[in-house]
Image (cartoon, rainbow, N blue to C red):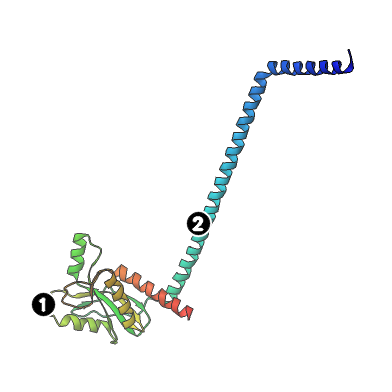
Amino acid sequence: MNLVECFVCLLVGFAFALFVIFILQKEWLYTGSKRLHVLYESIRSYTQTKQELQGQIKILKSQIGELERSTMQLRDERRLIELAWQKSLGTLQSTSRVSVDEAMIFGRGEEWVYLYTFPAHEHLAQARQQKHFPMKLGMSTQSNVVDRVHQQVSGNSTAISERAIIRLVFRVNSSRALESWMHEFLKRNGRQLVGSVGVEWFNTNPIEIEQLFRSYVLQRLDAQTAD
């Protein structure tokens, strides 16, 4: 047997040996392949989950940043309001036709924007569970805002059976500007009373008007800062 024949015999023998090993170890190879496939799927699932978590973390970081900026903005706004909007230490005196026992007074100006109503309007709104009810929103440059309201309700003294109740008073340096700004907002939102005998009557409440004043103060401060 020459060298070539010997080499061929060796190859055939080696191939046969591999075949025998494959037959004998077929189950082991199948199990190993299956395990490798499971491992591959686990790695792929882990990678996908990791990417999803990274995306969620990025979104959460962005939301946290927005909350931090909002918190800082609210803190700055509160500080500005506290500086510009100080509750007045002054007192008002009720009259025979006007009650100021529960009036809230804010501001430090020389003029007035006032909000008053009559008990009947409040009681009816409470009975009907309505948030808004007729209120008079006006302004005055007189030294005493109660005198101004007293003059208004005294003109109808024979027709009015109860005292007017002043709920809010804002002391400002430009009462006409604030009054016009509030009137415009209420009119745009359909709050002006239609067919009312008196002028400057709106369906509103003290909380809404107080919030409007806060907004007005912030806008004025922003405008001053921009200038």
Seen as rendered, the residue at the extreme top is 1
The residue under the point 24% across, 74% down is 116
Instruction: Please name the residue shown 54% across and 55% down the image.
Output: 61
Q: Pick whichever, 106 or 67, lies toward us.
A: 67
Q: Amino acid at mark 1?
A: Ala
* Nearest to the observer: residue 109 or residue 17: 17
The tag on residue 63 is 2
Q: Secondary structure at mark 2?
A: helix
The x and y percentages for residue 132 are 24, 66
Q: Quadrant of residue 123?
A: bottom left
Rounded to the nearest whole Å, what is the CA distance between mark 1 and mark 2? 59 Å
Q: Residue placed at 53% from the left, 60% from the top? A: 65
Residue 109 image position (x, y, % from top left)? 36, 83
Residue lying furthest left in this view? 158
Residue 142, placed above or below residue 87:
below
Kindly identify which numbered label has been placed on residue 159: 1
